[in-house]
Image (cartoon, rainbow, N blue to C red):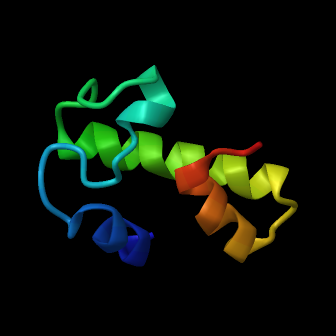
Amino acid sequence: MLALMMQESGGQGNDPMQASESKCGYIGCITSPEESIKYGVKHFKSVLDKAKGDVKLTLQSYNFGGG
């Protein structure tokens, strides 16, 4: 998860997991690092479940969507 966060944002800013778009559909709705991490982990878990545990597919789908 830390590597994913570093890839997404370098661990910087109010949305270090870059999770706003998956939560709200637009950039900037998450305004605190805590909310970003909480939602980012929740989203990652959801994608991991849909990918049946395939971590590589999950990492790609985290950014590009589950389709």
Assign the N terminus to one quadrant of the image. Answer: bottom left
Q: Is residue 46 left or right of residue 27?
A: right
> Which residue appears at 46% of the width and 23% of the height?
25
Q: Quadrant of residue 65?
A: top right
Residue 38 picture location, percent across and down = 40, 44
Residue 22 picture location, percent across and down = 50, 34
Q: Is residue 54 left or right of residue 15?
A: right
Residue 59 picture location, percent across and down = 60, 67
Give the vertical position of 3 relative to 20 (above or below): below
Q: Is residue 40 left or right of residue 35?
A: right
Assign the C terminus to one quadrant of the image. Answer: top right
In this figure, what is the number of numbered marks? 0
Which of the two residues, 10 or 40, is positioned nearer the viewer here? 10
Q: Is residue 38 left or right of residue 11?
A: right
Looking at the image, which residue sits at the far right? 52
Which of the two residues, 15 or 34, is positioned nearer the viewer here? 15
Q: Quadrant of residue 10?
A: bottom left
> Which residue appears at 46% of the width and 28% of the height?
23
> Which residue appears at 34% of the width and 48% of the height?
18
> Which residue appears at 43% of the width and 21% of the height?
24
